[in-house]
């Protein structure tokens, strides 16, 4: 590229100096149809230089004026978008604060930036629903794009449009690319409808994408194992993954014990006792009223010889005795624990009252009932 420019520069110099070398001024004649232009090389050079300078000045002037227009337009647009975004933010905060009238006013379609209309309408629908205006809320939701309607499925449920919510979210289970929020929304819908079979089929996706933390899983699993028979409890537990089985283990044992099934799980409870997981064992034993764990009871009593005042261990014995209708032993142990700390009274007074009533210790039962009920 540099070589080409050097050649061009050399040609220009030669043309400029040639007339001087031969003693001529140089003459140029340009003819086009009936038009002719005559002049010397020098005059043509000067005109070309002036034309170049003129074109450059005009270019710079036009660029400057265009930049002024662009900056002015940008400032007005930016100010307008900022005002719309402020309306959206204030409307959202008003909704969260319970000021649904202000929220509905600010969250109109014309008062929010492009791309935020769906969120604005859904929040306005929630505000209308909170005000009891179900028809307005439903109109706002129906005007949402289908993609946005999916995220507002819970609002359809609150408007008693469960079938619509189900229709919107059902494809989520079949779509491997479903987002975490979509999976979470669908799982909550299934829980509300007690559709445990469909929820079980969704578990692998929820695990793979790590949609739920352990606390959320525990909340789901508690409902998952409630109000069913022994066979169904075992069936559902066996369908769980290894990770979920570990999380659900105590819930599973508690569910079986609450149904009176102790034979198949006493070994697990004994392992828990030997590992001194007394608090977990107590939580499970307190869940039922009628079960037989004779071997476990003997082992608990042996452990108490080493730790005679261990409160959780004492309470384990009290609940085992209560479940086996030994109200005398149960009442005695409850009294011993209650004398140690007020905290245990607040947590276990109901079970103690049932034992005290059986032992005709009505005044103590009445005292506990009046204080903590």
Image (cartoon, rainbow, N blue to C red):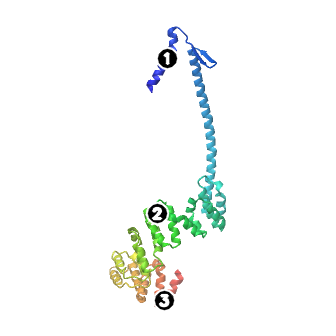
Q: Which residue is drawn at 44% across and 26% down?
A: 2
- Indicate whether 104 appears above or below 281: above
* Quadrant in the rendering for residue 53: top right
Q: Name the residue under label 3.
A: 357
Q: Which residue is drawn at 54% across and 9% down?
A: 24
Any part of residue 219 in sight: no
- Indicate whether 225 appears above or below 72: below
Q: Name the residue under label 2.
A: 211
Q: Nearer the viewer, residue 337 or 84?
A: 84
Q: Where is residue 357 in the image (x, y as percent from the top left)?
A: 48, 89
Mark toward the start of the polypeptide (3 vs 2): 2
Give the farthest residue toward the front: 33
- Indicate whether 80 appears above or below 66: below
Give the farthest residue toward the top: 23
Q: Mark 1 points at which residue?
A: 13
Q: Residue at x 46, y 83 (%)?
A: 351
Task: Work out how far the residue at label 3 is from the one at label 2, CA to CA, in angstroms.
Answer: 47 Å
Mark toward the start of the polypeptide (3 vs 1): 1
Q: Residue at x 52, y 84 (%)?
A: 369
Q: How crowded is mark 1: few (under 14 residues within 10 Å), some or many (20 or more)?
A: few
Q: What element carries label 3?
A: helix
Q: What element carries label 2?
A: loop
Q: Where is residue 169 in the image (x, y as percent from the top left)?
A: 53, 65
Q: Is mark 1 on a helix, strand or loop?
A: helix
Mark toward the start of the polypeptide (2 vs 1): 1
Q: Is residue 14 left or right of residue 91?
A: left
Any part of residue 115 in sight: yes
Q: Mark 3 touching mark 1, by CB under 8 A?
A: no
Q: Position of residue 92 (x, y in %)?
A: 60, 59
């Amino acid at each position: 590229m540099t070589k080409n420019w050097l050649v061009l520069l050399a040609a220009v110099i030669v043309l400029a100096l040639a007339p001087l070398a031969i003693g001529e001024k140089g003459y140029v004649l340009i003819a086009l149809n009936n038009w002719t232009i005559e002049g010397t090389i020098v005059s043509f050079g000067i005109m070309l230089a002036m034309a170049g300078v003129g074109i450059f000045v005009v270019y710079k002037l036009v660029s400057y004026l265009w930049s002024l227009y662009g900056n002015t337009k940008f400032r007005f647009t930016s100010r307008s978008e900022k005002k719309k975004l402020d309306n959206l933010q204030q409307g959202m905060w008003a909704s969260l604060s319970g000021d649904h009238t202000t929220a509905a006013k600010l969250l109109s379609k014309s008062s929010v930036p492009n791309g935020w209309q769906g969120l604005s309408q859904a929040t306005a629908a929630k505000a209308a629903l909170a005000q009891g205006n179900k028809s307005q809320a439903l109109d706002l939701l129906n005007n949402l794009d289908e993609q946005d309607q999916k995220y507002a499925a819970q609002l359809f449920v609150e408007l008693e449009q469960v079938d619509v919510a189900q229709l919107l979210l059902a494809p989520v289970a079949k779509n491997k690319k479903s987002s975490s929020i979509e999976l979470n929304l669908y799982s909550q819908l299934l829980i509300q409808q007690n559709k445990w079979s469909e929820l079980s089929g969704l578990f692998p996706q929820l695990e793979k994408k790590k949609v739920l933390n352990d606390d959320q899983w525990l909340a789901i699993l508690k409902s998952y194992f409630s109000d069913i028979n022994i066979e169904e409890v075992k069936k559902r537990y066996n369908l769980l993954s290894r990770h979920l089985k570990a999380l659900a283990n105590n819930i599973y044992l508690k569910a079986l014990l609450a149904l009176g099934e102790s034979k198949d799980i006493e070994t697990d409870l004994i392992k828990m006792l030997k590992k001194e997981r007394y608090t977990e064992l107590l939580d499970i034993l307190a869940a039922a009223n009628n079960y037989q764990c004779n071997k476990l009871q003997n082992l608990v009593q042996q452990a108490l010889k080493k730790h005679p005042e261990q409160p959780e261990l004492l309470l384990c014995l009290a609940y085992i005795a209560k479940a086996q209708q030994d109200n005398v032993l149960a009442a005695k142990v409850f009294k011993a624990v209650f004398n140690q700390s007020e905290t245990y009274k607040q947590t276990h007074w109901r079970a103690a009252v049932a034992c005290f009533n059986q032992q005709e210790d009505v005044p103590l039962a009445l005292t506990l009932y009046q204080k903590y009920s």
